[in-house]
Image (spheres, rainbow, N blue to C red):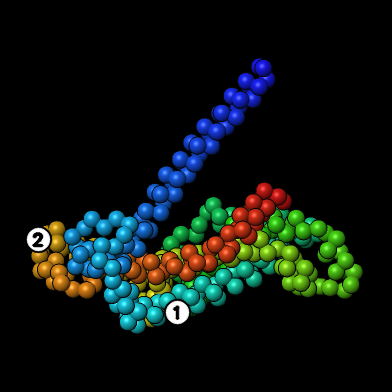
């Protein structure tokens, strides 16, 4: 009887704990999802009605005028092209260069492996500073060029550590058999390690893609060419315009607010629509990489 009571108490406590965990997760999910749904509702609501406030997660007066205004803007399309080109080229280049470095440092017979690893780890804790970095980029001759988005990001030390740890979990027998058949290190890397490392490659690809997609500082610091502005900087400009309009309205400049009334779009609606358009590709891609992401980050961070 006592054993049954203890078992019943344990089941009851587990049941209560499960309920609490579900409630916490529902709260976190709602708190995380609400800003996105609110932005989506504003972007799909008529501008004249949006100025009245009170929009929650559903648009009161549905319209696609905000998105039509974005699609008609050549600046948005050019920024989208720069962002996509930077993300694709930067991700592939980062995978190749960072993966090659990780493969080299994962070799047990590599002379000086520990020294090179320490040299790679130092920049993770001590940066060169803004001014030295700027002069380095300028000396390389890549300021105001597309390559300023690619070359400085080819090596990421944290991603290298994850890939190196994962490569160490690959059985040595695979490489030994390939070496016996006459394969060199390039063949071993691309035809043996690369195909069996799908989880960590998907994980690092997502890291690189999000880094390139969300970066705005590189454009701000190293380019002055409007044709090189990605989506993040275009969105930042729109947000600054919205803040300026709000400040003018708060100072009593009512002409701005009156000019917005009766129009099909306004700065806030365009801001929200631009934000939704800018994050949509990452939201679409992430579910396809999620299972690889979880597996890769766990193996790459724990083993090795």
Quadrant of the frame with the N terminus: top right
Image coordinates of residue 209 in percent, x first then y, are: 53, 67
- Counting labels gives 2
Spatial separation of the CA atoms under disc 2 and disc 1: 39 Å
Q: Is residue 193 visible?
A: yes
Left or right: where 248 falls relative to 13:
left
Residue at (57, 70) in percent of width and height: 91
Label 2 element class: loop
Decide: few, some or many residues near mark 2? Use Cα within 10 Å; few <14, some 14-19, many ≥20. few
Label 1 element class: helix
> Circles 2 and 1: CB distance less than 8 Å?
no
The single residue placed furthest to the front in the displayed view is 1
Image coordinates of residue 250 in percent, x first then y, are: 14, 58
The image's mark for residue 65 is none
Residue to which mark 2 is pinned: 252
Nearer to the camera, 73 or 30: 30
Left or right: where 66 falls relative to 214:
left
- Place residue 180 in its image quadrant: bottom right
The image's mark for residue 81 is 1
Nearer to the camera, 221 or 20: 20
Image coordinates of residue 194 in percent, x first then y, are: 72, 68
The first of marks 2 and 1 along the sequence is 1
- Residue 96 sits above or below residue 127 on the image: below
Left or right: where 1 falls relative to 260:
right
Nearer to the camera, 214 or 131: 214
Residue at (81, 73) in percent of width and height: 184
Residue at (64, 71) in percent of width and height: 96
- Residue 68 sits above or below residue 4 on the image: below
Image coordinates of residue 293 in percent, x first then y, are: 60, 58
Q: Is residue 119 visible?
A: no
The single residue placed furthest to the top in the displayed view is 2
């Amino acid at each position: 009887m006592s054993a049954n009571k203890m078992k019943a108490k344990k089941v009851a406590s587990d049941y209560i704990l499960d309920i609490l965990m579900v409630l916490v997760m529902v709260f976190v999910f709602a708190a995380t999802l609400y800003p996105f749904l609110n932005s989506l509702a504003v972007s799909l609501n008529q501008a004249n009605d949006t100025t009245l406030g009170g929009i929650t997660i559903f648009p009161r007066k549905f319209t696609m005028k905000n998105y039509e205004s974005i699609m008609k803007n050549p600046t948005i399309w050019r920024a989208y092209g720069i962002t996509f080109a930077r993300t694709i080229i930067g991700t592939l280049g980062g995978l190749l260069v960072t993966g090659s470095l990780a493969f080299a440092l994962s070799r047990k017979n590599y002379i000086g492996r520990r020294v090179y690893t320490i040299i790679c780890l130092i920049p993770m804790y001590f940066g060169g500073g803004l001014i030295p970095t700027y002069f380095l980029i300028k000396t390389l001759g890549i300021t105001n060029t597309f390559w300023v988005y690619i070359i400085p990001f080819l090596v990421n030390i944290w991603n290298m550590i994850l890939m190196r740890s994962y490569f160490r979990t690959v059985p040595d027998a695979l490489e030994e058999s390939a070496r016996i058949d006459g394969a060199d290190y390039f063949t071993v890397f691309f035809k043996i390690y690369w195909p069996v490392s799908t989880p960590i490659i998907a994980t690092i690809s997502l890291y690189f893609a999000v880094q390139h997609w969300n970066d705005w500082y590189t454009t701000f610091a190293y380019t002055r060419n409007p044709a090189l502005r990605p989506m993040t900087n275009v969105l930042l400009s729109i947000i600054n315009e919205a803040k300026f309009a709000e400040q003018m309205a708060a100072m009593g400049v009512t002409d701005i607010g009156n000019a917005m009334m009766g129009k099909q779009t306004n700065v806030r609606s365009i801001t929200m629509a631009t934000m939704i358009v800018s994050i949509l590709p990452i939201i679409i891609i992430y579910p396809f990489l999620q299972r690889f992401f979880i597996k890769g980050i766990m193996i790459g961070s724990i083993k090795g």
